[in-house]
Structure formats: C-alpha cells, structure tokens
Image (cartoon, rainbow, N blue to C red):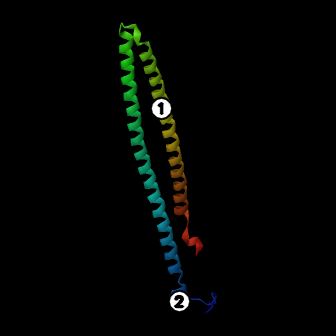
Amino acid sequence: MAYVDYDLWDGQDADLSWTAVAQLLERSQSRETDRVDAELDRIDQQLARRDRIHTEIVDELEWEIERYTAQLERLYRSTIGTQHGERTAIKDRLVRLQQDRREEQRRHWRDRQELERERRDLLRDLAAIEDEDLSELL
C-alpha cells in the first residue's frame, strides 16, 4: 500500500482527487434527500388515505344515527304504548353509535398526530441535509 505525503500532493492524482470526494459526498447527500422526500410523499399519501377511510366510517355512523333517531321519533309519535322495550333498545343503540363515533374521532386524531410527528422529524432531517455545507468537510 502506498502512503501519500499530503504536504507534497498537488491534487492531480485521480485516486485521491478532492473533486471525486466532493462528488461522492454530493451523490450521498442527494440520495439521502431523495429518501427523505419519498418518505414525506408516503406520509402525505397515508394521511390522505386515512382521512378518506375516517370520512367513510364517520359518514356510515352518522347515517345509522340518523336512521335510528328517525325510528325513535316515529315510535314516540305512535300511540301504541307497548313499544317501550323497542324504544329502549333503539336508545341503547344510539348511545353505542355515538360512542363509536367519538372513539373513531379519537382514533383518527391519534393516528394523524403520529403521522404528523413523523413528518416533522423528516422535515428536520431534510433541513439538516440541506444545511450541510459539503465544502466545509473538504
């Protein structure tokens, strides 16, 4: 193995070229930036997907709540007094549906917060990568 006396090095040796080192560092930085950008895109897609799923679930719960509420209102307007048990069952179902809706809201909020935390971390990483001045390393 040949050792180089850097005091005498004129920068022309292709194997030890600072330009080659700088290019290697720039390619590495570019790959890291691409990786972080891809992760940010993935998080954006996940957020959009999860928002769509959340909307579908909440819409379905809202539809059921409206249907049971209308059914309960019809039972209250009816003159037949033997429907007390049916009204109680519908009220219980409405309470469960409302609890499910609240739980879905909480679950969605937590899920979004986790993805947003990941996004913030990646944005910090990206800023750090972009702030690195490779010329200082050389």
Check disc 1 and give the amino acid type: Asp
Q: Is residue 22 above or below residue 96?
A: below
| SS type, badge 2 | loop
Which x, y percent locates residue 61? Answer: 41, 31
Query: Which residue: 39% across, 22% down?
Result: 68
Q: CA distance from mark 2 to mark 1?
A: 70 Å
Query: Which residue: 37% across, 24% down?
Result: 66
Q: Which mark is residue 13?
A: 2
Which x, y percent locates residue 88? Answer: 46, 17
| Camera-side residue of 58 and 117 | 58
Q: Which mark is residue 100?
A: 1
Q: How many marks?
A: 2
Query: Which residue: 48% across, 24% down?
Result: 95
Quadrant in the picture for the N terminus: bottom right
Q: Is residue 51 above or below residue 74?
A: below
Front of the two marks 2 and 1: 1
Check disc 2 and give the amino acid type: Asp
| Camera-side residue of 88 and 41 | 88
Q: Is residue 82 above or below residue 58?
A: above
| Camera-side residue of 50 and 82 | 82
Mark 2 or mark 1: name the one nearer the start of the chain: 2
Query: Which residue: 42% across, 42% down?
Result: 51
Quadrant in the picture for the C terminus: bottom right
Disc 1: CA contacts within 10 A as few (<14), some (14-19) or many (>=20): some
